[in-house]
Structure formats: C-alpha cells, structure tokens
Image (cartoon, rainbow, N blue to C red):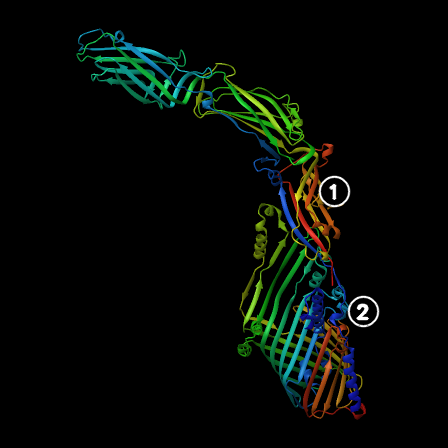
Amino acid sequence: MKSKLISLSLMTIALIYFGCRKYDPNKIVSTAWNPNIAIPLAYAEFDAYDILARTDSNDLVVIDPISGAIALIYKGEVVSYEAQDIVQLSDFSNTVSLSSADMGLTALGSFSGNVSGSTASTVTTPANGGVEMYTVLFKNGNLSINVQTNIQHDVDITITIPSLLESGSAFTRTIPLTYAGVIPQVAAISVNLSGMPLDLTQGNITFNEFDIQTTVAVAGNGNPLTGNESCAAELIFSSLKFQNATGYFGQQSIGIGNDSILIKLFQNSTEGFFQLIDPKVRFTVENSFGFPLEINLANLQSINVNTGANLPLTGYPNPLAIPSPSSMGLSTTTVLELNSSNTTNITDIVTPTPKYLYFEASGTSNPLGNVTTNFITDTSRFTVDAELELPLEGYAYGFTFSDTIPFTFSETIENIENIESLMIRINVDNGFPVELLSQVIFLDSNNVTLFDLMDAPENVIESALIDANGRVNQNTLKITDININETKIEQISEARYIVVNAVSQSLDGNNGTVVEFYDDYKLNVKIGMQVQGKLNF
Amino acid sequence: MNILKTTISQTLVVKSITCLLIGFALNSISAQKDFLLYGLDNLAQSQYVNPAFRNNSKAYFTFPALNQSIGLSHSGFQFNHLVHQRADDSLVLKPDIAISKMKGINYITSDIQNELFSMGFSIKKSFFTLSVVNKLQTRFMYPKDLFTLAFEGNGKSLLGERASFDGIGVDALSYLEIGIGFNREFGDKLKLGGKLKYLNGIANIHTRKSNLGIFTDELTFDIAVDGSFEINSSNIMSLADGNNSQLVSDFIGKNKGFGIDLGAVYKLSDKIELSASIIDLGVISWKSNTQSYVSNNFDFQFEGVDMEQFLSDSSDVLQTFLDSLGNSFTISDNQQNYLTGLYTRIYIGGKYKVTDKVTVGGVWYSEFINSKYRAAITASGDIKLTNWFSAALNYTYYGRGYKNVGLGFAVNAGPVQLFLMTDNIIGLLAPHATKNWHFRVGFNFLIGRKKNVSKDASLE
C-alpha cells in the first residue's frame, strides 16, 4: 500500500514537472504588430464673413439685416472740397486823403479855432472766380488803420464803416493826434474783426462793396496854417476768414479728378469667369455748400489687371444734379446708383476679375446761374464717395488658383519604416453653393515633381444644393480620403515645394445657374489622419 | 531578469513584455473557490465553505500556519492563446487570438488564505469552532477593448465604436478573520451552522466607480473621452512608503468589520443530501490611513487644432488644448472613512451516495464582482477507500474556462490528517492551457475520529 502511494506521488510530481511546457521568451521570433491609429488633426468653421473678409479687412461685407443676403462693398477714395476751395477772402486795403479844402482850412498866421471836414469812399473787395459776395460774418480778420497828417495842431480822425457792425452798431474809431512840435503826425490802431458782420450790398443794390466815412476835426493851438495841409487814413483788411457768407459764388469748375477701385474678389485667380446679376456702382455726394452743383461722370470703365483691357460703362445717367441745402448748417445727400436698370452693360464690365473700376468726375457750381442766393460756412464741404456693391448673386466658373508654398520637412521622421501608409481624411460640410477641385503636388529642390498627392484632381469641396431662388437648402458633405503610400512617405523628406492647384465654380456655374450667398452659410472643415503602422519585431 | 539586463531593443522590449505576460498568465490561472473542499466535507476546513459541515472527529485543532490555500483565476484567455509554439519550438505572439477569447470585462482574481489557527470540538449534537485566518483577496478587472486598442489601435474595429473601459479597476482586500462557529444537528436530517467573524482590515484598495470610454468618430476621427471614477484605499500608501514602524499600530484594531457565514445540510434520504451556504457576508469599515480619489464626470472632445486660432496665433494652440483638457478633467482627494463588503460567495450543493464508499455530487457556485454575477458548476465524486485515505475528483466550469479538473486526497495517520487538493490539476500539468489554478494543503490534528469505513474498502 505504502509503495503504491509513493509511486502515485512520484508519478504525480513527474507529470507536473514534465507537463509544464517551458516558454522561453528568447524563442519568440518575428511578430507583426500593425496598429491603425486614427486622430483628428484640425477643424474650422467658416462663415461667409470669415471667408470674404479674410482677404482684406478693409473691405466691407454687408449683410442685409432682413434677408441675410451678402454683398461686398469696395470703396473708392473720398473726394472732398472745403469751403476755402470755393470762396477765398483776400487781403485788401483802402486809403482816404483829405486836403485843406476838404477840412475847411485856409492859410492863417495863427489858428486857434475848431474846424472839421469829412469824406466818404467806397471800397470794392476782391473776389475769386466771379464770386459776388453779399454778406460776410468774419471768423477771423484784422483791420489796421494808419493815419498821417502835416497839420501843426491837435487833430481827431474818425473812421466809420456803416455796413460793418460792431455789437450791433456801425463800426467807428477815432484816432486823436496831439501836436508835439513834430510833423508829420502819425498814429495807428488795429481792430479784431472776429464776429463782425459786413454788408457788401450797399442796401441790396450791389455786391462786393462797402463805404468808409472819414472825418477830421482840427483844434487850433495858435500855430499858423499854410493852406497846404492834408490828412490821410489807410485801412488794411488782412487775415480774413469767414464764418459764413452769402452771395452768388459763380459757376466755378470743380475738378474732382479720377479714382479707381480694385475689385479683390478672386484676385489670386489666374483665370475664370464670374457674373453677378446685380452689381451696383454708387456715387454718394454730400453737399453743405449753399448752392447747387452739377457732377459730370466720365470714362467709367473697368480695367483688367492682368490684360490691361478696358471695358467702358455705357448708358448711365449723366450729369448728376446736386441740390443746395435749404439753410446754413444743413447738407444734402445725393446718391447716384448705377445698376443694371440705368446702365446697359454694368454686369459685363464687372466681369471678369480681377480688375479696377475706373472713373473720372468733374463738377460745376450754380449750373443754372444766379437764380438764388448762395451761402457758405467755414465748415461747408462737398464730398464724393464712390463704392462698388457686389451682391453675391450670380454664377462663376473656371476660377483657377495656384500657389507654390516652400516646404521643408525639417524634422526627421523617426522610425519612418514603421509607417506603412497614411490616409488623410478631409471632411467638408459645405453650406455654400460653390465647389472646389484641387490637386496638390510635391516638388523637389529642382522643381521636379516627386508625386501628386491625389491620383487625380478631386472635388475636395462639393457644392451645397439650392432651391429655385438660388438659395442653399441643403448642405453637402464631402469626404476626401488622400492615401499616401510608403513610397510617397519616403519622398516627403525630399520635398521642397508644395504646389496647390484648385479650380472653383459655383453650382452648375458653367450653365449660368444663379446662386445666392447668405450670412447663414457655413463651411465646416475637419481634417483627420489615419496611420497604418507596421512594426515587426 | 537577465533579459532586463541586456541592451534595450525592440526585441528585448517585446520579449520583456512577453515575460510579463507569461507571469501574468501563470499567475492568473485558477480560482480559489474550494469546489473540491465542498465535496470533502469531512475535513475540518470544510467549515470555510459551509459552516454546517463538520468533520468526523470529536475535536480537532490545526497546526499553526500549516494550512495554506492559494487560488488564482484569469477569465480572459489562456497563455497558449497568446503565445503559439511552432513546430521548430519557436514562439509566435498571437494577440488577436487572445483578444478574441476575451469578454467585455475580464477578471484576474486571487485568493490567498493562511489559516493561522483553528480548533473545534463537539458537545452532544453541537459542534463549536474557532478559527483565525489571514485572507488576501485581489481582483483586477480589465476590459477587452483595452487590449484591442493597444493591439489594433483605434482605427480598425473600434472606429466608430466606443472603446469601453467601464469597470476597469483593481480591488484588493486584506484582513484578519477571527471566527467562532457553531453547528448543530436538528433531528436526523437537518444540520444548521453559522459563524460569526470579527474582522480586522489590514489594507484595502477598492474601485468604487470606474467608467472610461474613448470614442473615435468614424468619419472625422474626432476623439471623445468620457468617464468618471472613484477609488478608495486604506493603508496602501503606508505599505507603499514602507513605513513599517507605523504599520502595526495602523493595522490593528482600526479597520473593524464583522461577517457571518451561514450554512445548512439537509439529508433528504439515506442517499441524498442537500446543502447550501452563504459565505463572507459582511463589511469592513476602513478608517486607517484612508485616501480616496474622485474624478468628475468628464467628457472631453478633441477635434484637432482649431485652424482659425492656429492661423492667428499658433503659439497658444497647445496651451489652449491643455487648458481645455484640464478644465474637463478634475480629480479631488479626501481622507474619508468608507465601507467595503466582503467578497460574498454562495454554494448550493447536493450529494448522492452511490455506495458506502462512493459519493457523487454537484455544486452551484455564485459570486458577485462589482455587481456582476459570476457562477460555476461543479460535478464531483469522492471515494473513501479506507478509513485513512479518501480521494475526490471533480469537474468545474468556471471563469469561462472548461478545463478544470479537480483532484484531492486526505490521508489520516493516527490523529494527524494530511490533505492536499486542487480545483484544477490541469493547471499544474499544463498551466499554459488553462485559466484557473488552485492549491490547498494542510495538517489537522483530530481527536476521537470515527472509523466508519469497512476494511473491504482498503486499497491494499
């Protein structure tokens, strides 16, 4: 019995020992491990504003607050004329002389009495460009009065300008000359004209004129009179600036000049065609001058940036009448919108791009002559703004873009042999009625093609679908898988340039299908990558 | 170890990993569920699976520290699923086959019991026991998707699916159990037993909540990570720090718990006996050196780099990503006390006495791991060949493994009883080809043992 038990025990131990299979890790031979890793790389959501305003933040993307329709606004330079460009007040002077007879003086050995005399003179102010000034309220100005006499007695010289009001009364100044044994006796005063109104109509019968009254009073001091005495007063008006003025400012020619607006939409495209069905060129004239104007447009045309070819706009209304504001401090705004209804070919001249919209303009004041009293203030302006509005409603096709990007894969790809393939997945959920065909080419340092990223150009972005009005009613999701095999992966390190070629068009653009752009359109882009590993041990 | 000392290379790394996997597989074969012990109910240790069981002596005591039980189980895959031996004796790793054998959640469990002391005696129809047992039970739960993700990446079968790591975690429960048992015969048919147990927790780590998922969008490859977790621990940090001077004071008496075992045996007839038990029903309150980590319910979405931000300022992209990640995922810690339940088991068995020497039976075993039910079914037979030798054989389906053949012996030499058993002899003979491993050995000193086996049944 005991021997059987011992035998059974030994057999059990032997079974356990020999039954245990020995696994030596050193006996593990080559084993493949091929994990597949999928990771997101990048994402973005673009709306119309993001895309359109990204090219130049100075351009204006306008969204209709009611419909959400989008338009691009390209603005031209502002042309402006200031009040001083229309009416200038030049310096002028006037001298009044009184003889002994004018003053009632005769030769005497000794004169101790009092005598006076006066004279009146009319001053005509200088005027530019046929300006007929009726009234002026001075903002700035200086009146210098210089008097001189050879009378050997005390003299008071009084200057009065009835139409120049100072605190509501006629301007007057008396300059006393007290004889001190020296002749000629001289004196001078200076008067600030700020705030003083001057009437230049002589009682509504003329313009640019006013009178000066000069009175000389002599108080005898016993000295003799020679009978050849005289007295002179010189009035110098200088540094004149008006606060406002009335009159008739003539038919002055206002040279607005020329300007051009660069239409940047698709400016990177090398070729292509687009047509917007309702482009608008808008001239906005703001006038705070108190007289009507007439604006003449000329040579309104588009100039192709690439070819230099020009295409004139025809049929537009010309000239443009600019009315006068009704009173000082007001202004009028006049808008001339050139569109497809008042021109014959505006849709054509905006096509194709890129191009400049060129225009010239000139103006004339009081085109109907002197039919109403003009006015002007020191802040009066005349401005002309030009802008091109492109409501994004139309179609486009064949827009080709190409860009070469320097590329250096500076970082060494470690264990590149462990990558069997890459797959880059581009998800584009497109809410725009536009599609994009693209190809990416890798070049070496000699611009020799290493490989095309895709087997053939592929629609990376497919157009959203539209309703009968051209508005998008369904987004389109396009998934593009770009497979990069082992050979291409190895060639990436040799690449020095990446050429990106793309052709874009609106939905069915080559058949003239009109699409519209609204502010609720979105373009969602997600890029992911799938790496197929190849790890052999 | 020799491998680790060689030059680091890919091959070495793989082989090192393989070594770990070999150890991992070997250490996870077989569970200590004592299916065979349930059949050998004349052993004193059978009280640990059903307190209504009693041995056939008037009294017994065990030799301190000589009764050991070790059980390990891995429900995922067998080692030879992972490592294939070719005809030329070389080995090839086949992780895809190993993964195919896994379920959604897989368990690596271990159960180690050191019976420090045990004694029992009968008074008339009653039997009293006293036992002191040191227990260490561990569970590591891992999801299949974890291996799928590591082997396949997220670009194959997991693409468009949520790689679920829900339930991943580790539990470890170490405690000293002092039990006083009692069973009594009621009439000729019924025996009822119970054991009250005072528990002193030594160390614990408990994954109370564990949810983690990684979803990769099949179209965009966007990655979403969601989840939440809560992990409690007691005395783990002290063990890790090796602060032994404080260990004894921390372990003794601070983590108190109570448990109960209940059992019944009903003799349906002279040949048929039914039994049932519920073991380790109880809790431990952990108060010593507790440390818990709780996360928020995080949900992080990674869509790649924001192109618009990158175009405007590429330097902030990484920081933005880290900020976003940091804002999504927060962990708080606390030192609050907590409760854990014992790893409760339920046995329901039946026996049929074929002859006086041969008995056949079956056991239905149940357990719950983190609210997940696991079961085993055992068919067994035992034979009492002589008064001093008995043997038992069983077959168990457990842990998604069907290669579980148990074998055990009990030999009585005078008052000394020696027993040796395993729930899976295949685990000893071919550890690479099974999922469960178990071994129990011990010595008992029996007083007043009944001699009820005829001499005809002797092996001699």
Q: In this view, does A280 lie above or below A291?
A: below
Residue at x-position 65% and y-position 32%: A354
Q: Mark 2 points at which residue?
A: B86
**Percent x, y for residue B353?**
78, 84
Check the residue under mark 2 and report the chain it is in. B
Distance from Cα at disc 2 to Cα at disc 1: 49 Å
From the top left corner, tell me how far across and down residue A501 is, in percent. 70, 40
Mark 1 packing: few (<14 Cα in 10 Å), some, or many (20+)?
some
Out of A400 and B167, give the one closest to the viewer.
Answer: A400
Q: Which amino acid does label 2 sit on?
A: Arg
Residue wearing tag 1: A457
- Chain under callout 1: A
Give the residue at x 55% y 69%. B291
Quarter of the picture containing the C terminus of chain B is bottom right
Question: Mark 2 packing: few (<14 Cα in 10 Å), some, or many (20+)?
Answer: few
Res B147 → quadrant: bottom right
Q: Where is residue A27 in the image (x, y as percent from the top left)?
A: 76, 70
The reply to whether residue A254 is visible in this rendering is yes
